[in-house]
Amino acid sequence: MVVQSKHFLNTASSLVLDSLKGLCVINPHLALDAANRVIYLAKLDRTKVALLCGGGSGHEPSHSGFVGQGILTAAVCGNVFASPSSSQVRRAIDLVNNDKGTIIIVKNYTGDVLNFGLAKEQHSAIHPERSDRVKFLVVGDDVAVGRAQGKIVGRRGLAGVCLVYKIAGALSARAGSLDEVYAVAKYVSSRLGTIGVGLEHCHVPGTAVPDTHLGANELEIGLGIHNESGHRRLSPVPPLNELIPNLIKMIISTTDPDRSFVPFENNGTDRVVLLVNNLGGLSELELCAIVGETKSALDKQGISVMRVLAGSFMTSLNMPGFSITLLLLPNANDTGAIPADMILSLLDDPANAPGFKWSSNMEPSAALEMSCPVSSPASPLSSSQFALKAPDVASFNTAIRRACDAIVAAEGEITEMDKIAGDGDCGLTLKAGASGVLEALNHSITGEDVVNSVITISKVAEEKMGGTSGALYSIFFSSLAQALAHSSAEIATLDVWSSALKTALAKLYTYTRARPPSRTLIDPLAAFVDVLPAGLESAVSAVQEAAEKTRDIDATAGRSTYIEGEWLKEKRVADPGAWGVKVIIEALAK
């Protein structure tokens, strides 16, 4: 898979500071110490415990995006994937200094631990009277690296730390003491498990374009948030319903002594908070599918999901991947535990940090589909009272099958056209419609009943194609069925078809402004309707000519309207929708 290596920036060296300035523009409650790249609350409440975090940039919204009432007090930002210096951190400690105390929370990476730890010790040396007012917590939630391999460095810090920020921040906002906030943060960090998976590594702005790290059909499990290689690779990329259960098992396993980090019971009593984190390059479409599949996998394991959070929390620039974090809530009989209800209520408390995404302060519903009354309006065209027949029933069926087969065969050609002239989905959309019609040929399309056959084609276009093309085809065929139904003829002759097609096109014109020449499917369709009364052969020739002409005309409707006209003419690519109509009509007329 190719690494996306282009970026919008002034210079790579100024990107972090430029981003922090923009963050403050969006969020006036934040302030910036530009010299030290510290984001902090503009109006500090020094009667509350301060929470300070930070690390390398490139993980946004972590860490600066979590500064806000109810979460963090300040965040220190290093260069991309590089820890801030101890002097930067010392400045942050001074900025948030208060009577209640400060907790420094860092992910378990050597640079962060050393630089934040050094700053804490330096601060204590300079201000010995405050040394007991600054506490230090290292969070490691990764389950990919086993105990043997990570015995010196420990578990890496991943997206789970964001839950620690939120829960500890909420307790601070409730005026919890330094010891209380620290105890809750430490307990929560001990109950976290996270596993990440990616389709490719990310690209760091200002660095050379890397070679492809993973194959076109390969993914990596257990990769880190700084481009560290993962635990293992899989090829081909499995479907989500196979991948996610395996990821879940890595978190909840208690049989692998090397990776049994979190004390799951696995007996149907476990309750968790689920965090699905976008590592930076996933679409929202994919992310929600991942959330749903993860919830389903946990249900099958007998694990109750009490809260769900999803979005970009701890990214790795533009990495196309995600991580799953489970926070195991304590059972009622766990000794020394922070009560589960308290953890959930702290998680539910409001927060105004720009990077914190919260879905609902309630348990996800077990019923994804709600029952509701469904109206079933009777369709006057859906009965068999309209006995309009084809002149040759067998030829009618064969022609439709031939047209569908032609569209399926032309999918690749039409798709390539649409990659240049549109959004790349026209071929697949037409193929989906053709496949649906082929299926319907087995039971509800027949030359014995032309009207209901056309109605069926309209429904297939609506249900299988979707989008603009599906709507256009469905409207046209629905209108065509109405016109045919109002014919007094018993046999669908050329004259009957010509009259009905003219009516259907006029009805379609009430829903689109496209008129020939428009570089759309309207061009060959209108040509066919206009010339058909003169004969089928002439009409097919008119269709071919109209489709070919779309190579050289300006687009006035459709996706091509948004593409630079001269570039389209230079490419001389036909309009994919028009070409699809040409393929259909040519095949029907053979």
Image (cartoon, rainbow, N blue to C red):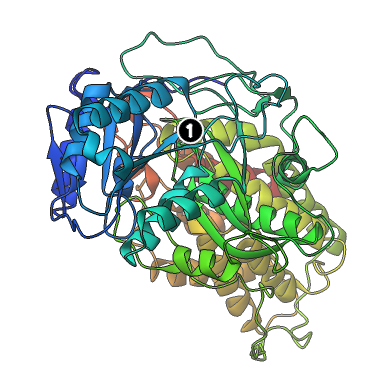
Does dot 1 land on a helix, a strand or a loop? Answer: helix
Give me the residue at 76% from left, 86% from top.
383
Q: Is residue 166 visible?
A: no
Q: Is residue 525 above or below residue 340?
A: above
Q: Is residue 259 above or below residue 174?
A: above
Q: Is residue 133 visible?
A: yes
| 452 displayed left or right of 50 | right
- Quarter of the image where one finds residue 493: bottom right
The residue nearer to you, when weighing 329 against 573, is 329
The residue nearer to you, when weighing 165 against 391, is 165
Give me the residue at 68% from left, 75% from top.
367
Q: Is residue 572 above or below residue 22?
A: above
Q: Position of residue 330 (x, y in %)?
A: 66, 61
The residue nearer to you, when weighing 242 against 44, is 44
Q: Residues within 10 Å of mark 1 (few under 14, many from 20)?
A: some
| 571 displayed left or right of 296 | left
Q: Is residue 78 above or below residue 430?
A: above
- Quarter of the image where one finds residue 422: top left
Residue tagged 1: 419
Q: Quadrant of the C terminus?
A: top right
Q: Quadrant of the N terminus?
A: top right
Q: Position of residue 46 (x, y in %)?
A: 18, 56
Q: Position of residue 534 (x, y in %)?
A: 55, 55
Q: How many marks?
A: 1
| 456 displayed left or right of 362 | right
Q: Position of residue 435 (x, y in %)?
A: 74, 51
In this view, the residue farthest toward the front is: 129
Please name the amino acid that badge 1 sits on: Lys
